[in-house]
Image (cartoon, rainbow, N blue to C red):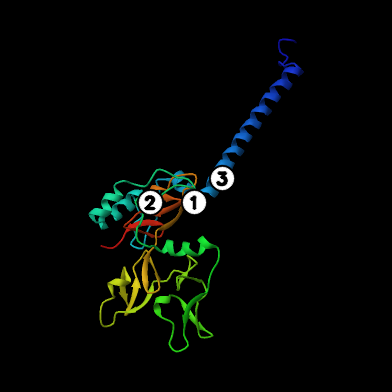
């Protein structure tokens, strides 16, 4: 009978319902696609994007078996605070800069020449001069000329170095070495070499420093970028300069985190 016949909506109503469901599904798919594109853009534009999405992170277990019950930021802050001088503490208290962008101007930056300044010399000109202007006809090349090789009685820059003002500076940030060339078998390392440690009778640069021409220069580039987002808090006291996350004065980059330079 009619009373027992199941209700079947008209064909036009069923079609309308299907269209609404289809339209809703399409909208959800489009929104999901847009979200993926936005996240992808952030990943390309800023190496620190995942810090912002996943913060706070918990440290994995270390060699001592400590599985890190504290968030990464808190652990970094405690370690940094334990080693700071009053001057460093004053800078760290300001926290990371909040400004960002490819044209951002850094604050509280190093006044002394850093490893990143030296590396920037080669990239700023786009041309690598290899002749230091020195001669090795009678004697070897002077140590003050940096990384050189004697070729055809001329002091030429070694591979991976470029000459500026008669000195060969590294041009590749990956060519970081801690060996200053100095020894400490009898006496301490000369203070003029910068932040050094005596290891195996050799004057080696302290962590967060690289050697060039016998001197140790502070590494300030954390490897993070800030073109579209600010530097991650877990990197420590940083400033955004031209889209790069750099350590502020008195701090050096060790494994991507700004740590206070030795007292």
- Examine the rendering and report whether any part of residue 58 can be seen: no
Q: Are marks 3 and 2 in contact (CB under 8 Å)?
A: no
Callout 1: SS: loop
Quarter of the picture holding the N terminus: top right
Residue drawn at the location 49% of the way across and 51% of the way down: 47
Q: Does 134 sit left or right of 75 as displayed?
A: right
Q: Using the numbered discs, state the Cα–Cα distance from disc 3 to disc 2 in whole angstroms.
A: 23 Å
Q: Nearer the viewer, mark 1 or mark 2?
A: 2
Residue that numbered label 3 is attached to: 41
Quarter of image, res 34: top right
Q: Foreground residue, 152 or 85?
A: 152
Q: Does 72 sit left or right of 244 as displayed?
A: left
Residue that numbered label 2 is attached to: 238
Q: Does 23 sit left or right of 167 as displayed?
A: right
Image spot of residue 204 (x, y percent)? 35, 73
Q: 10 Å neighbourhood of mark 1: few (<14), some, or many (≥20)?
A: some
Quarter of image, res 254: bottom left
Q: Earlier in the sequence, mark 1 or mark 2?
A: 1
Quarter of image, res 178: bottom left
Callout 2: SS: strand
Residue drawn at the location 63% of the way across and 31% of the way down: 27
Residue that numbered label 1 is attached to: 47
Image spot of residue 238 (x, y percent)? 38, 51
Q: Using the numbered discs, state the Cα–Cα distance from disc 1 to disc 2 in whole angstroms.
A: 14 Å
Q: 10 Å neighbourhood of mark 2: few (<14), some, or many (≥20)?
A: many
Quarter of the picture holding the C terminus: bottom left
Q: Earlier in the sequence, mark 1 or mark 3?
A: 3
Q: Are marks 1 and 2 in contact (CB under 8 Å)?
A: no
- Examine the rendering and report whether any part of residue 37 can be seen: yes
């Amino acid at each position: 009978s009619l009373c027992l016949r199941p209700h079947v909506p008209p064909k036009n109503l069923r079609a309308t319902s299907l269209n609404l469901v289809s339209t809703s599904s399409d909208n959800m798919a489009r929104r999901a696609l847009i979200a993926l594109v936005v996240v992808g853009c952030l990943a390309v534009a800023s190496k620190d994007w995942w810090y912002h999405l996943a913060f706070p992170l918990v440290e994995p277990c270390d060699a001592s078996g400590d599985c890190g019950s504290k968030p990464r930021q808190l652990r970094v802050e405690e370690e940094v605070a334990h080693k700071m001088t009053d001057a460093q503490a004053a800078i760290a208290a300001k926290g990371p800069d909040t400004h960002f962008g490819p044209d951002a101007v850094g604050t509280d930056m190093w006044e002394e020449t850093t490893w990143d300044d030296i590396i920037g010399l080669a990239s700023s000109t786009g041309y690598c001069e290899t002749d230091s202007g020195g001669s090795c006809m009678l004697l070897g090349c002077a140590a003050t000329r940096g990384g050189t090789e004697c070729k055809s009685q001329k002091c030429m820059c070694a591979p991976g170095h470029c000459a500026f003002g008669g000195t060969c500076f590294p041009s590749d940030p990956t060519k970081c070495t801690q060996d200053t060339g100095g020894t400490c078998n009898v006496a301490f390392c000369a203070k003029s070499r910068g932040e050094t440690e005596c290891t195996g009778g050799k004057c080696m640069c302290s962590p967060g420093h690289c050697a060039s021409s016998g001197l140790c220069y502070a590494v300030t580039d954390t490897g993070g970028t800030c073109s579209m987002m600010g530097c991650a808090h877990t990197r420590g006291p940083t400033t955004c300069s031209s889209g790069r996350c750099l350590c502020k004065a008195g701090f050096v980059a060790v494994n991507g985190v700004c740590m206070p330079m030795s007292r």
